[in-house]
Amino acid sequence: MLDKDFIEELKRLSVEFVDDTVQYVTDTTLHLALAIFGYVLFCVIVYFATVYLMKEYGHLKTVKKVLFVTAHPDDECMFFGPIILKLAQRSDCQMFLLCLSEGNYENKGKIRKQELWDSCNILGIPSSHIIICRHDHLPDDPTVRWREEIVANLILNHVESLSIDTVITFDKAGVSRHQNHVSIFYAAAYLCLEKKFPHYCRAYVLESINILRKYSGLMDVPISFLLSSYWYILSLRERDTILAAMKAHRSQYVWFRKLYMLMSRYTIINTLKEIEIVDLELDLVLDD
């Protein structure tokens, strides 16, 4: 039989181990909670400082005529809402929207076309500045990569005819990796590499981010400051305008898009990067 003293010692050690474990978990949880609270407080402070004290800090400075190139009706408010709304507040800036499809994936092209007019009216893009393409080779389909030469010609034609000085579109990840989005980037990249854009025109892309940042809302503000060259951040009241614009897309405003609009940082933060030829050449080398 086991010695009585040994059993008592074993019980004592077991109790100490449990007490130490509970204390460790409690301390760790407390420190983690304090760290999270501290970061949230820091984010809120940075956010309000940015919105109310540094209103134009980090914005594009020489923009006069902007062409947003999107793939579908609702891209303008789901992804580009903050920068569109901010530029709409400037009296010295004209905005144009080139939407490369009617969004006919579910045979709702006519409905979505009208919804785009309604959304842009809320965001501040004049109806006369909205161009919607209907092209047999540019179907609304998440699995179809559009031919870059077709997209490039459409972009270039509108840049030249409208004397556009700034083009803004998706980056190579297309925010959601939608193949239609990605096609637009490669078309714009081609125009930059071949130096086909007029000398006065510069091209920028909306930065894609990882899923954790994508759904972190204003918690992403400090990271955006650190990692991005240009950013546009909305106040909470301005964000309500983005939500109203998305509601204008009634045929698309289903439950998962409602969640997206509530949680996505793209409804409150846009970060941009200029398309640089050096970066494009490096990407091509890495792809090879």
Image (tube, grey):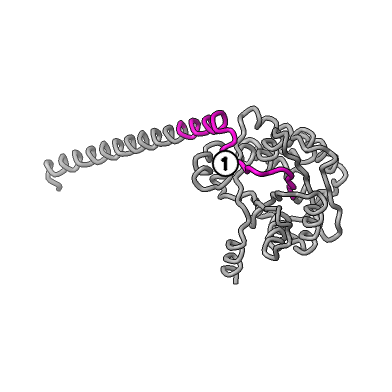
| x, y percent for residue 155 | 77, 55
| x, y percent for residue 234 | 62, 34
In this view, the residue in front, 208 or 166, is 166
Q: Is residue 160 left or right of residue 215?
A: right
First to last magenta residue range: 41-69
Considering only vertical position in the picture, is 7 above or below 241? below
In the displayed orientation, state which residue is furthest to the bottom. 288
Q: Which residue is label 1 attached to?
A: 58
Q: Residue at x 57, y 48 (%)?
A: 211
In the displayed orientation, state which residue is furthest to the front. 199
In this view, the residue in front, 167 or 9, is 167
Residue 45, magenta (yes or no) = yes
- The disc labelled 1 sits on which kind of residue? Gly
Residue 144, magenta (yes or no) = no
| Res 128 → quadrant | top right
Count of labels in the image: 1
Q: Residues within 10 Å of mark 1 (few under 14, many from 20)?
A: some
**Helix, strand or loop status at disc 1:** loop
| x, y percent for residue 240 | 67, 30
Q: Residue at x 67, y 64 (%)?
A: 193
Q: In what quadrant of the picture does the C terminus appear?
A: bottom right
In the displayed orientation, state which residue is furthest to the right. 110
Q: Residue at x 22, y 38 (%)?
A: 16
Q: Is residue 160 left or right of residue 177?
A: right
| Res 119 → quadrant | top right
| x, y percent for residue 268 | 62, 37
In this view, the residue in front, 88 or 147, is 88
| Res 177 → quadrant | bottom right
In this view, the residue in front, 266 or 9, is 266
Q: Residue at x 57, y 66 (%)?
A: 282
